[in-house]
Amino acid sequence: QVQLVESGGGLVQAGGSLRLSCAASRSIFSINVMGWYRQTPGKERELVAVIRSGGITNYADFVKGRFTISRDNAKNTVHLQMNSLKPEDTAVYYCYALMTPDQYWGQGTQVTVSS
C-alpha cells in the first residue's frame, strides 16, 4: 500500500505557473506508474500525465508542451510543473499510483486559474 499527499495547488492568473507535488508514504522506485488526473464538477476524472518506473511519460493532448511530469525517487515524490495555465485547467488535481493490480489516489488539490 501507499498513501499519497498532494500539495502546491492554489489560485493563479491565466498564463501563470504552478508546481504540484505528490509525496508518497513509501519508496516509489518500484511503483509501476505514477501520475496526475484532474476532475471538474459533473465530469469524469481525466488523465493529465503519467510517468512510468523507467521514466517514460505520457501526456494528455490538452497539456502537451505546457505541463511536465517528473519523479524524484530519492524523495519519493512526483511533481507536475504546469506552465501557461488556462482557465479551463481549473480542476481538482489528484495524484495516482499503480501498483498492479491496485490503484491508489491522493485526496486532491484544487487548482483555480482566473481569466
Image (tube, grey):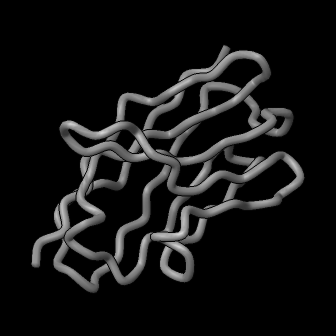
Q: Quadrant of residue 24?
A: top right
9 over 5 or under it: above or below:
below
Q: Is residue 45 left or right of residue 79?
A: left
Image x and y of residue 54, in percent: 89, 52
Residue 106 relative to residue 58: left or right: left
The quarter of the image holding the C terminus is bottom left
Residue 5, by quadrant, is top left
Along the line of sight, which residue is nearer the eye, 7 or 57?
57
Quadrant assignment, res 88: bottom left
Quadrant location of the N terminus? top right
- Relative vertical location of residue 60 with respect to residue 35 in this rendering, above or below: below
Residue drawn 48% across and 79% down? 66
How many callouts does the rendering have?
0
91 up-or-down from 103: above or below: below
Percent x, y for residue 17? 35, 77
Position of 61 compared to 88: left or right? right
Residue sitting at x 83%, y 39%? 29
Q: Nearer the viewer, residue 64 or 106?
A: 64
User: x, y percentage for residue 52?
Assistant: 79, 48
| Residue reaching furthest to the left | 115
Q: Please give the name of the residue rendered at 61% of the width and 26% of the height, measured from the top-left corner.
A: 25
Residue 36 locus on image (x, y percent):
52, 48
